[in-house]
Amino acid sequence: LACTTLDCTERVPMGELRAGDLVATSAGLERLVLNQHVDDHELADLLRIQLSDGSAITVTPDHVIAVDGAFAPASTVAVGSTLSAGTTYPWTPLAVTKVSDIRGGVVNPVTPSGTILVADHAGGAPLLATTHPAWIAPLFLNAYTFPFIATRVVARLAPTSLEAYYTAAEGAIDRKSTRLNS
């Protein structure tokens, strides 16, 4: 679930988010640039990370989250690590009590700041995550503004069109790469 208010009292399933929707991030409320993989029904290897207060987050192993006070791939999380929780800085560290391998669908809302506050269930503490995998997170997190200004403008002016274009392009790239790998 993604927080849609700064206090995280309102949350929506991440698969329901679309470009232009407001979500809570480390920078405040931001409009989504786009939501990746919404129409992709493939299952992926995931990590479900459970915390001492009952909160949890489910992410791909290479997805970057706030671990022990710094951004790192979820694959680095171990029992005893802490994740950053709460709605504002300074974040509250919550101890990891269990890390499980599971399979499931992937959805990835992308924000201008590259961060988002999320939780696996309505009662869980909001956890700080990035909206990027490890290979590109440093570029997006260290950029002064979203690296592709035109994309951010289009997301603001024509969010439905941008999302439709991205979804079509993502599908075409996936089909092309499947043929090349065969």
Image: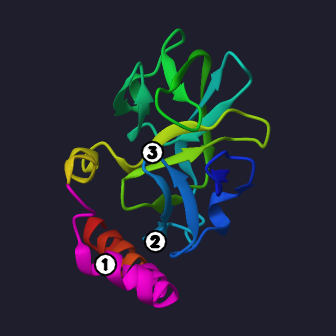
Kindly report the distance in space between the C-alpha atoms of the residues bearing marks 3 and 1.
21 Å
Residue position for label 1: 151
Q: Residue at x 37, y 33 (%)?
A: 73
- Residue 136 lies left or right of residue 30; in this view the side is left
Magenta range: 144-169
- Along the line of sight, which residue is nearer the eye, 133 or 104? 133
* 42 versus 142 height, above or below: below
Q: Residue at x 43, y 88 (%)?
A: 157
Residue position for label 2: 34
* Residue 85 picture quarter: top right
* 61 versus 154 height, above or below: above
Mark earlier in primary sequence (3, 1): 3
Q: Residue at x 24, y 74 (%)?
A: 149
- Along the line of sight, which residue is nearer the eye, 40 or 93? 93
Q: Secondary structure at mark 1?
A: helix
Mark earlier in primary sequence (1, 2): 2
Which residue type does callout 1 highlight?
A: Thr
* 144 versus 162 height, above or below: above
Q: Quadrant of the C terminus?
A: bottom left
Secondary structure mostly taken by the magenta-highlighted segment of the chain: helix
Residue position for label 3: 26
Magenta span includes 13:
no
Q: Residue at x 61, y 68 (%)?
A: 17
Where in the figure is residue 4, as x and y percent of width and height?
64, 58
Where in the figure is residue 51, as x and y percent of width and height?
64, 21
Where in the figure is residue 43, as x and y percent of width and height?
58, 54
Q: Residues within 10 Å of mark 3 (few under 14, many from 20)?
A: some
